[in-house]
């Protein structure tokens, strides 16, 4: 069944603007935790020279992704992929992960970094989007409220510190290239494989 996440309609264009600056011209873009599939369908149209590989661990999400991306020539069938587990992918030229890090247990982020370190060739990007904390920078009140909601869902969820994520990235050969402030108190973090 096709799912809809209203936030995708608000954030997809600003995300695409950053992607236009950091994605490779061609190759395979792997999306981790594709959710509804709406982002993948939109980005496939925005970046037609890339082949897109959506993924998600949730069977209902996989069904939604398949519906959103049906008939798109540059999108592969969605893969069942848990970032914290084994990845059924052997290579990628870019990895994109939107709104997963805060709403999954920390081992999912560790798996994301390890997977990106294994799959990406030198210079290839790992691109993250979502709400994060930064040391020395006050967290927006809306993000503080959001974190309370996340913690109610699971004590393992929560806004992660950019510095903690970056430390794990570095342990897997990924270097933070830039942090981009986005609408609604979100950030994009762009890492490159060293």
Image (cartoon, helix red, strand yellow):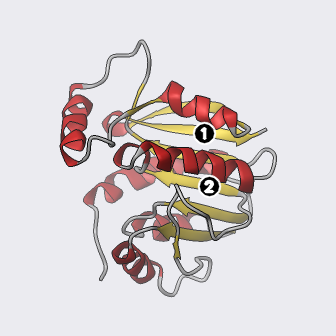
**Where, by quadrant of the figure, is residue 136 drawn?**
top left
Q: Quadrant of residue 86?
A: bottom right
The answer to whether residue 127 is above or below residue 73 is above
Q: Is residue 34 above or below residue 69?
A: above
Disc 1: which residue: 190
Could you tell whether 110 is left or right of 64 in the image? right
**Which residue corresponds to the image point at 67% horizontal and 32% vertical from the top-left?**
170
Which residue shows up at 33% across the image and 59% down it?
9
Q: Observer-nearest residue: 64 or 169?
A: 169
Q: Position of residue 76 (x, y in %)?
A: 59, 79
Residue at image mark 2: 95
Q: From where the camera sits, is residue 90 visible?
A: yes
- In this picture, is 117 found above or below 73? above
Question: For the point 78% across and 44% down, which residue is it?
Answer: 123
Please, what secondary structure does the residue beneath circle 2 have?
strand
Mark 1, Cα crowd under 10 Å, few <14 / some 14-19 / many 20+, is: many
Side (left or right) of 148 relative to 16: left
Q: Quadrant of the N terminus?
A: bottom left
Query: Percent from the top left, x then y, of residue 194?
Result: 79, 38
Q: Position of residue 103 (x, y in %)?
A: 34, 48
Q: Nearer the viewer, residue 89 or 143?
A: 89
- The kind of secondary structure element at disc 1 is strand
Judged left or right of residue 146, residue 48 is right
């Amino acid at each position: 069944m096709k799912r809809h996440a209203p936030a995708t309609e608000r954030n997809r264009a600003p995300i695409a603007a950053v992607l236009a600056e950091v994605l490779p011209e061609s190759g395979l873009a792997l999306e981790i935790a594709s959710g509804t599939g709406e982002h993948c369908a939109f980005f496939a149209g925005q970046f037609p020279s890339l082949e897109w590989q959506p993924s998600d661990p949730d069977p209902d999400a996989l069904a939604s992704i398949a519906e959103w991306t049906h008939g798109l020539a540059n999108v592969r069938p969605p893969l069942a992929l848990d970032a914290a587990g084994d990845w059924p992918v052997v290579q990628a030229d870019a990895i994109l992960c939107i709104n997963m890090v805060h709403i999954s247990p920390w081992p999912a982020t560790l798996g994301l970094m390890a997977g990106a370190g294994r799959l990406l060739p030198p210079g290839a990007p790992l691109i993250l989007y979502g709400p994060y904390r930064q040391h020395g920078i006050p967290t927006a009140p809306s993000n503080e409220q959001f974190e309370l909601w996340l913690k109610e869902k699971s004590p393992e969820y929560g806004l992660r510190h950019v510095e903690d994520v970056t430390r794990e990235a570095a342990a897997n050969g990924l270097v933070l290239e830039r942090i981009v402030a986005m609408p609604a108190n979100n950030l994009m973090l762009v890492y490159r494989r060293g």
